[in-house]
Each structure stands twice: as structure tokens, then as C-alpha cells.
Amino acid sequence: MSDENSNNEENLEPEDINFETMKKTPLQKAVVLLLILFAFMGCSEDDNGINCENGTQQSQVSRIFIEDQNGNTLIGPDNVFQFQNFIFFNETTFIQLEFQELPGNFNAINFDSLLMEDNEDFKFVINEDGTQFVIINIKFKTIEGDCFDQRVFDVVKVNDVIVPSENKSFSIIF
């Protein structure tokens, strides 16, 4: 024997293999076929691994920036407008606001846009005595999501003037 076969290994040639003994019984074939079938039934084209059954959409955060003509933020403790003075409402709905400091000296006002009806006017008060305000009107469009549809801004008007917006944010320029 050679050193290659010294570990009780056999070198099998194709003619040495008895393929008759390797054949599967009809029952074994059926079991394998069923396993493959179940594996494919568990998958679908829209299966993205997200379980939507237990989820509920709580809110949808949108963002307002208040800036000068050069893009500098005007919101914050050492700026023109103080967050604690902001109020966002209409006749039927008061919208809670949240101040957020962002990297790069950008400050934003976050709000839940699910509280707003489509194409409805809201008053956004920005000073302490309520004399400085803008009227904001947002027309939404719906983007289909995996579990929940997303409402994004389609057209944003500030004092009846269309302003540039992204999906969930826009700027008010002073």
C-alpha cells in the first residue's frame, strides 16, 4: 500500500460505485419533494422580512427649518426666534412641536404631520406675543410602504406662496 492509502482511505473509481444502492425509495423522494415545496411556499416576491401584523404607525415626523436668505438657522437660544414661543394650530387641531439641534449648526422644528388634514391651513406663531406668524398649507401625496403608507409633502405653501420642500421638510425664509 502507498502512503496515500495508509489511513484506511479507499480510492474509489467511478466503476467501483454501486449506484443501484444509492437510489432513493419513492417515500424518500416524496419527503424531499415536500420539503422543497414547503421551502418555496414560505417565500414570496414581496417577502422582505418585515412583520407588519404587530406594528402600528404611531406618528410621522416632519420638519420645519427657519432660515435667513443665506441658509443660516434663525431658531435657537442665541438666535432671532426662540423655540418656546412657537405654536402650530388651526381651529380644530393643536400640533405639538419639538426642537431639534442638528449637526452643522442647523436647528429644526419637528412635528407629527399625521395630525394634519390634507390641504388645510395652519397658523404657525413664531414670537412671544403672537403677532408674528405664517399660514402653512401642505398638500400631501401618499407613497406606498411595506407596512404603512407614507404621507409626504407634495406642495407646501407659506402665506399662499409655494416654497421648495423635500419629502418631509421645508424651510421658511426670513
Image (tube, rainbow, N blue to C red):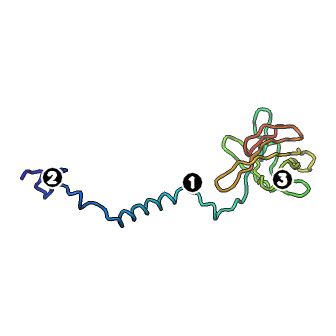
150 vs 17, left or right, is: right
Do we see residue 130 in this rendering? yes
Residue displayed at 84% across by 51% down: 86
**Front: mark 3 or 2:** 2
Q: Quadrant of the C terminus?
A: top right
The quarter holding residue 24 reads bottom left
| Residue 23 % position (x, y) | 28, 60
Give amino acid for label 2: Asn
Give amino acid for label 1: Asn
Q: Are marks 2 and 1 in contact (CB under 8 Å)?
A: no
Residue at the top extreme of this rendering: 70
Residue displayed at 15% across by 55% down: 10
Residue located beneath label 3 in the image = 117
Residue displayed at 86% across by 57% down: 93
Which secondary structure lies at badge 1? loop
> What's the CA distance linking mark 1 and mark 3?
31 Å
Residue located beneath label 2 in the image = 11
Counting residues from the start of the chain, the first of labels 3 and 2 encountered is 2
- The disc placed on residue 48 is 1
Residue displayed at 17% across by 50% down: 13
**Front: mark 2 or 1:** 2
Counting residues from the start of the chain, the first of labels 2 and 1 encountered is 2
| Residue 141 % position (x, y) | 76, 46
Counting residues from the start of the chain, the first of labels 1 and 3 encountered is 1
Which secondary structure lies at badge 3? loop
Give amino acid for label 3: Glu
